[in-house]
Amino acid sequence: MYDEARAEQERLRALVRAESAPGLRLDGTVAGADVAYDDESGVCAAAVVVVDSRTLDVLDRAVAVRPVEFPYVPGLLAFREAPPLLAALDELRARPDILVCDGYGVAHPRRVGLASHVGVLTGIPSLGVAKNPLTFTHGEPGEERGSWAPLTDAAHGDEVVGRALRTRDGVKPVYVSSGHLVGLDDACALTLRLTPRYRQPETTRLADRLCRDALKSGIPR
DNA sequence: GCGACAG
DNA sequence: ATCTTGTCGC
C-alpha cells in the first residue's frame, strides 16, 4: 500500500540539498507552518505565520481550510500535510526566506520528511523541528540551552540525520534536521533564535494557534 | 511475523 | 493530531 507515495519520495529524495544555499539569510523572514485536524468534519486547517527572525514580529499569516485527503501514516506525513500547507503558502504576500516545519526534514526513513518535501516542491529553504525522535537514536545533550547531541539512524550505519537540540535549560530537547537548502548548523542556529522563551520555535507556536483557531471558528455547525 | 512509528 | 482539570513552579 502507498507504493505511489513512496515512489514519489524516492523521486524527491534526489532533489534534496541538505546544505545551506549560498547567501542563505538567517536574519530575514522566517515562516512557521502547522496543521490541525477535526475528525468530526474530516477537515483540516493549515496555517503559515511569517516573522522577522531578529525581532520575531509577525509580518504575515495565511490559513487554508480543506478536507483531509490522506491518512496519517508514519513516514508519509508529507502526503497528508503538504497539500494544505502549499495552499496556505500560496496566500502569503511574499515568499519567506526560510520555512520551519513541525516534523522532520532529512531525518526520515527515506530522507524526505515533511520539511524536505515542501522545501523541494516550493524551492524555499527549509528545516524540520520535531518533538519526538521517532526511531532515531541520540545521546543526552547537556542540560543547558544550546547543547546538542547527534541524531543518528541505527538502521543505516548510524548516519547522522539531525540533532537533539536543547532549546531550554533542563527541558526535553527538540529534534532538528535539514529540510532543503539549509545545513544542520544553520538549522540549529535559527532554531535557537526562534526559542527565546519556549521549547518549540515561536513560529510553530504561532502557526499552531492560528490553525487551531481557524478550525474552531471556521467550521459552521 | 511482530512491533515501532513525525503529526 | 486529539480527548482533558488541576496543579506545581518560575
Image (cartoon, coloured by chain):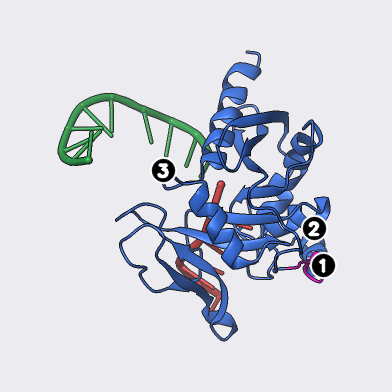
Chain colours: A blue, B red, C green
Q: In which chain is the residue bearing label 1?
A: A
Identify residue for label 1. Answer: A15
In this orientation, does residue A178 appear? yes
Left or right: A172 in relation to A81: left
Q: In which chain is the residue bearing label 2?
A: A
Q: Position of residue A149 (x, y in %)?
A: 43, 71
Q: Provide the secondary structure element on which disc 1 rests.
A: loop
Callouts 1 and 2 in the same chain: yes
Identify residue for label 3. Answer: A198
Disc 2 residue type (three-letter): Val
Looking at the rendering, the stretch of residues picked out in magenta corresponds to A11-17
Q: Quadrant of residue A170?
A: bottom left
Q: Earlier in the sequence, mark 2 or mark 3?
A: 2
Is residue A14 magenta-colored?
yes
Relative vertical location of residue A157 with respect to residue A82 in this rendering, above or below: below
Q: Earlier in the sequence, mark 1 or mark 2?
A: 1
In this orientation, does residue A107 appear? no
Callouts 2 and 3 in the same chain: yes
Q: Position of residue A19 (x, y in %)?
A: 70, 69
Discs 1, 2 touching: Cβ within 8 Å: yes
Disc 1 residue type (three-letter): Leu
Left or right: A161 in relation to A24: left
How much space separates mark 1 and mark 3, taking CA atoms? 33 Å
Q: Residue at x 79, y 35 (%)?
A: A94
Is residue A126 magenta-colored?
no
Q: Position of residue A135 (x, y in %)?
A: 51, 69
Q: Residue at x 80, y 58 (%)?
A: A120
Identify residue for label 2. Answer: A120
Q: Provide the secondary structure element on which disc 2 rests.
A: helix
